[in-house]
Amino acid sequence: MESWLDLFLLGMASFRLTRLIVYDLITEFLRKPFHENVTETLEDGSTETYIEIKGVGLRYWIGELLSCHWCTGIWAAAILYVGYELYPAVAMPVTTILAIAGIASLIQHVFIKD
């Protein structure tokens, strides 16, 4: 690691990449083969949506991975770090964009509160 700025960028990029994979609608196509969205109507008339993991074996394992931000976060951090070390000319622009998006996400969450 060359600087604290690099560590900060990798940390924010890992945060944003993890959220992108686990939660964002734009990447739902990645999760669809492994997750089934189930919506139930509760006694009070409200609805609750949750996911069920599909399949067994490797398919189930990937489904679990894609539903867990802690698990996906480790893999996202590892991929970003390997890119940082082996292919910095490609990885750093991607890392910087993800980090900027991560910072914007935090600002939105802390100050705007939809």
Image (cartoon, rainbow, N blue to C red):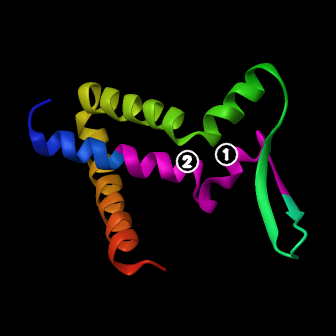
Could you say where residue 11 lies in the image, as x and y percent from the top left?
Answer: 29, 43
Q: Secondary structure at mark 2?
A: helix
Please rate how many residues cluster around mark 1, counting C-alpha atoms within 10 Å: few if below 14, some from 14 to 19, many from 20: some
Q: Main secondary structure of the magenta part?
A: helix
The quarter of the picture where residue 54 lies is top right
Question: From the viewer's perspective, is 3 left or right of 95?
Answer: left
Could you say where residue 50 lies in the image, as x and y percent from the top left?
Answer: 76, 54
Q: Quadrant of the N terminus?
A: top left
Q: Which residues are magenta?
A: 14-38
Q: Secondary structure at mark 1?
A: helix
Name the foreground residue: 44 vs 102: 44
Residue type at the position of mark 1:
Leu
Name the foreground residue: 27 vs 46: 46
Name the foreground residue: 61 vs 41: 41
Residue type at the position of mark 2:
Ile
Q: Residue at x 62, y 33 (%)?
A: 65
Question: From the viewer's perspective, is 35 left or right of 10?
Answer: right
Give the labeled residue for mark 1: 30
Q: Check the image and report above or below for 69 versus 41.
A: above
Q: Nearer the viewer, mark 2 or mark 1?
A: 2
Give the labeled residue for mark 2: 21
Could you say where residue 79 lies in the image, as x and y percent from the top left?
Answer: 40, 31
N-terminal label among 2 and 1: 2
The quarter of the picture where residue 8 lies is top left
Q: Which mark is residue 15?
A: none
Q: Check the image and report above or below for 100 versus 17.
A: below
The answer to whether the residues at label 2 and label 1 have Cβ atoms under 8 Å apart is yes
Q: Residue at x 49, y 52 (%)?
A: 19
Q: Is residue 26 magenta?
A: yes
Residue furthest out toward the front:
44
Residue furthest out toward the left:
3
